[in-house]
Amino acid sequence: MGIKIGLISDTHGQFDRRLKSLFREVNHIICAGDIGGIEIIRQLFDIAPTIAVSGNTDVDLKAVLPEYIFYKVDGIKIFVCHIIEKNHPSWGELSKLIYSLKPDIVVYGHTHTYVASSSNNIIFVNPGSAGASRYPVSRTCGIIEKTDNSILVQIYDLSQDIQLKYWQNFIIKDHV
């Protein structure tokens, strides 16, 4: 049996009520920062247990939310941080930490653009931005589903009709 995890980032204080339907079958939710207020986390937690990190705009939440989290659920090692950018001042230390922990998945946000890729046996997923459109990109969120030795990443467009926008299946490999 697998596990489903809802992925959301960059809500900036906006909670799309349709997430209740989209995330109705998830076991957990990961919120990758720029949340915009504790009320958003409460609304997500009403759907499923929620793990959240603070983002660069979450000034009021920095005292209660960590900058990053590393945890394991259903055999998947997950690292969550808001900003994962090679040109960011913290990238050197952060990349050393990530590659020393050897997570299966890194979930991040900040760019408002969805990404699903892999590097060095690590799956990197940015669900995009689920908040009000601030850039000429679609509002999106995601779901990851683990089955046996694979991770299915699904990105959903939150336009008028929620639609599957992108998906990719990754094989989980043992870290050497």
Image: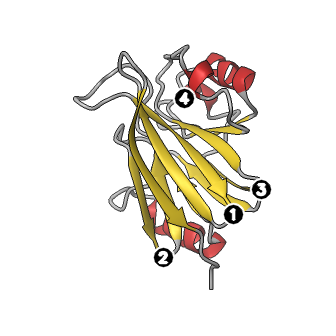
Residue 98 in the image, given as x and y percentages of width and height: 57, 67
In the drawing, what numbered circle is on residue 59? 4
Mark earlier in primary sequence (3, 4): 4
CA gap between label 1 and label 4 equals 39 Å
Front residue of 146 and 61 = 146
Kind of residue indicated by mark 2 = Asn
Q: Which residue is mark 2?
A: 120
Circle 4: element type: helix
Residue 66 image-quadrant placement? top right
Front residue of 62 and 47 = 47
Front residue of 45 and 68 = 45
In the drawing, what numbered circle is on residue 169? none
Front residue of 134 and 162 = 162
Mark earlier in primary sequence (2, 4): 4
CA gap between label 2 and label 1 equals 20 Å
Q: Residue at x 62, y 20 (%)?
A: 20
